[in-house]
Image (cartoon, rainbow, N blue to C red):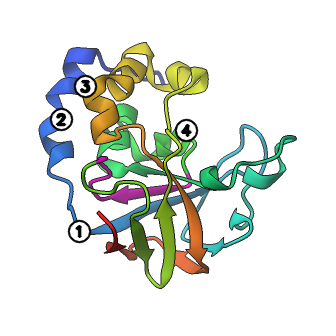
Amino acid sequence: MTVRNLTLEELEAGLDEIRESPRDHGVLAMIVRRPAVGAREVVEQGELDVASGLVGDTWGSRGRSPHPDTQLTVMNSRVIGLLAHDEHRWRLAGDQLLVDLDLSAENVPPGTRLALGTAVIEVTGMPHTGCGKFASRFGVDAVTFVNSPMGRGLRLRGINAKVVQACIVRVGDVVRKVQGG
């Protein structure tokens, strides 16, 4: 299947829908584990752990000392929906949690805590930007789009977070702000 990457103009045309993301109560749309470099596993439920992040993900074992503020990456499902065209391609973003929630810097600044079911994660200040792999999967215009000043303010590429209260999370769980923001 050949997928055509959207142009910058086509991506910008999708901003209105992205800006309509819920601000306080959203939903966990997808959970993706990375069990090995380049591998993606979509799961209906996952265990969030304070020490290891998403259990079964390789975040903590990629040959370098992992930064605790990059334990989880979270991306807005409306953004990846626009970039990927097809839900089967969402996993290619490399983010573990895809949520329908406004992840803008204004709405969820660093220190904001988000409950996913009874698990709690905290937004960190580490920037999350598009890399070469992201560009190869979604196009150079996608990287320009998410890394533009507007894209960074809306955090179109997503956010980094860490687990502060462990629990099992499930696709469909409510995601809500519980502190900060």
The residue tagged 1 is: 24
Amino acid at dot 3: Leu
Residue drawn where x is 46% and y is 44% of the image: 90
Q: Is residue 63 left or right of residue 96?
A: right
Q: Is residue 168 above or below residue 57?
A: below
Badges 4 and 1: C-beta atoms under 8 Å apart? no
Task: Specify the quadrant of the image occupied by residue 55.
Answer: bottom right
Asked if marks 2 and 3 touch (Cβ < 8 Å), the reply is: yes
Position in image of residue 118 (x %, y %): 47, 85
Is residue 27 covered in magenta?
Answer: no
| Circle number at residue 15 | 2
Image location of residue 147, percent across then percent down: 38, 25
Taking the image as drawn, is residue 58 in sight?
Answer: no
Residue annotated with mark 3: 11
Label 2 and label 4: CA atoms lie apart by 21 Å
Instruction: Kindly identify the residue that appears in the image at 25 percent across and 55 percent down.
Output: 107
Q: What secondary structure is found at the residue carrying circle 4?
A: helix
Dot 2 or dot 1: first in sequence order is 2
Q: Main secondary structure of the magenta part?
A: loop
Q: Range of the magenta residues?
A: 96-105
| Tag 2 near tag 1, CB within 8 Å | no
Element under label 3? helix
Question: Residue 14 lies in what quarter of the image?
Answer: top left
Q: Give the label, 3 or 1, closer to the camera.
A: 1
